[in-house]
Amino acid sequence: MTARSGLVLATFSATMVYGRPHIATAAECAATPTQPARPPAPATEPDAPSTALRTAAETSTGTTALAAQPDAAASTTASADTSVASADTSVASASTATTGATQALAIGAVSCSGTCVSSSAFAEDHGYWAVNGTSTGLPAGTLVSLYYSYNNGAWARVRDARTTTTGTWSVSPPPVTSGGGCRWMATTGGSPTVTTSLRSRIISRTVAPRAAFIRATGTYASTAARMSLWGSVRPGVAGRTVTVQRYYSGAWHDVGSATTGTDRNYYWHTSLGTNTLASYTFRVRYLTQHHGWAAYSPAITLRRVLPADSVRLTDAQARGVLAYKGIPVASSGACSSRYSASCTALDTIRTATIRQALRVRDSGCPITVTGGTETGHATGTYSHWTGYKIDLAMTSGVSAYVGRVAASQGGPYWYSYPTRYFNEVSHWDLTVIE
């Protein structure tokens, strides 16, 4: 390209020197050319071209013939044009070098937005990559592609952006979905493996191979209320599912689930153990969305407890608590209605009364409840009907317990705060006043 441009320029210069344009015919090309008139040559100029030059001229085209003439002016012009062409090439090279130097693409930052573990280590599912950068020498609107490589694997295109009038660019933050080593690069010409693309430097970040910290909190629950478990996922986002597990039979078992709210907290409730005094051990598990990394909360034990002493229980609640402790309820009519004297009812019985029966059982002796809140007993403020009394079958174990913990009040009466014991021969009558 350069040599041909030089020849064209030489032809144009020769035409201008001699003052007349001339286009050779086919016959003239075949004939021996006649050298045109020219100004006097210097004394040192040779009289005629060498045989080699002439032979070359005779076997060449007209354009080449002009360039091959031993014409000082033409030779000088051709030489100058060749120098110009060389200079053009140098300028082009310099321009290319300048372009490469002034056009640049850079990643300004790759950071985690939202809930991050730290600026360089993130937990999966719990943050967003915030990627932005600058460009130099690129027109506004230039397409910039963001590429991502996981653990030094193949580059994958993530998002596109366009440069602004000030040369900046940014992409909408993609979520953190992978763990391990993450590499980022921006290009303007496709994949980072394409050598013609303008590429930024590589920025590396690490996603911690773990999920998050799970906190679980619970409280003692009464026999009637639901047990509650709550906690948080940190760092975390709304809408993630956590699994509640319970430990029994030597292993952990899934028993429920909950979803994190906008505050990244979860709440779980269960009626497990209602009307009992049971205790249960739970933990909470979180699995990351993409790779299934698991995080577990510490184990926590929730226990069913009796409500306040003044709280009145339903028949089902009272029976459930007694049954949990292995205490049977007996009646001649095998029923539980309050309105039949042949039944044993526990409806509306006070918690304090049930609690005292449990104390007797916890002493180690078996007991059987034979009377509760059913009709047929003496009336009064602190009576069976009002829930202050309970009857226990007469056994040597109960008698020994009374003699050990209570003081005789004379006759069949014994007392130990808050309970008064009355020996009715067939059973012990307990009145609990707190």
Image (cartoon, helix red, strand yellow):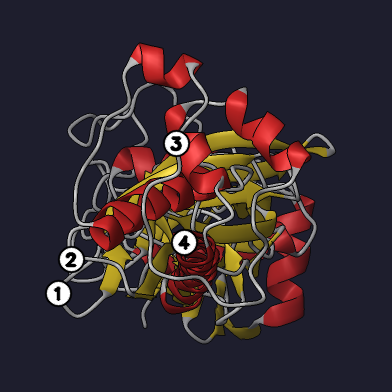
Number of numbered markers: 4
Residue 365, by quadrant, is bottom right
Mark linked to residue 318: none
Q: Residue at x 24, y 52 (%)?
A: 348
Distance of label 1 from label 4 (alpha carbons): 33 Å
- Dots 2, 1 in contact, CB < 8 A: yes
First in sequence: mark 1 vs mark 3: 3
Q: Amino acid at mark 2?
A: Ala
**Residue picked out by circle 1:** 165
- Return the x and y of residue 381 as percentages of the image width and height: 18, 71
**Residue picked out by circle 3:** 34
First in sequence: mark 4 vs mark 2: 4
Q: Nearer the viewer, residue 165 or 52?
A: 52
Q: Amino acid at mark 4?
A: His
**Residue picked out by circle 4:** 126
Distance of label 2 from label 1 (alpha carbons): 5 Å
Callout 1 secondary element: loop
Callout 4 secondary element: loop
**Residue picked out by circle 2:** 140
Q: Is residue 268 visible?
A: no
